[in-house]
Amino acid sequence: GTTSGKKARRALWGIWDVIVWKFWKQGNDVIFNNAQPNLEKMVDHIKMASWNWLKTQSPGFNFSLVNWIMNPLECMFVF
């Protein structure tokens, strides 16, 4: 595959890992700490953690956190 294709796959796998990790953490919090699930808060945490992962692991990802939070899919298509 092309370099850009490899970069996109790596970014998508990183985002997938963040999503799975956040669901795992919330599940543990619900089970072990009697926390209430909060989908809106979890989505915000996923956006923040995925942006942080992309900023540190994907050269060329130069979007601000505000841009990422407002429209992550648009950032992915431009990236």
Image: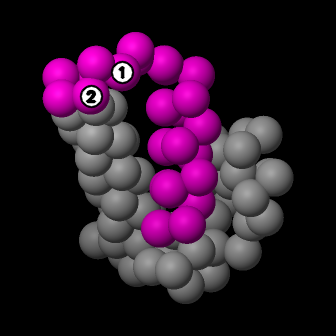
Q: Left or right: 38 with respect to 31? A: right
Residue behind mark 2: 33
Figure disc tally: 2
- Residue 46, image x, y percentages: 49, 43
User: Is residue 71 visible to the viewer in this orientation of the structure?
Assistant: yes
Q: Which residue is drawn at 56% across and 29% down?
A: 41
Q: Residue at x 50, y 56 (%)?
A: 49
* Helix, strand or loop at mark 1: loop
Q: Which stretch did the figure color magenta? A: 30-53
Extreme residue in the front direction? 33
Relative height, residue 36 to residue 43 (above, below): above
Q: What residue type is labelled 2?
A: Asn
Q: Is 44 part of what is drawn in magenta?
A: yes
Give 31 or 44, whichever is nearer the viewer: 31
Q: Find the distance from the CA under tag 1 to the CA under tag 2.
A: 5 Å
Residue behind mark 1: 35
Relative height, residue 58 to residue 14 (above, below): below
- Residue 42, image x, y percentages: 49, 32
Question: Cβ–Cβ below 8 Å for labels 1 and 2?
Answer: yes
* Helix, strand or loop at mark 2: helix
Q: How crowded is mark 2: few (under 14 residues within 10 Å), some or many (20 or more)?
A: few
- Residue 48, image x, y percentages: 59, 52
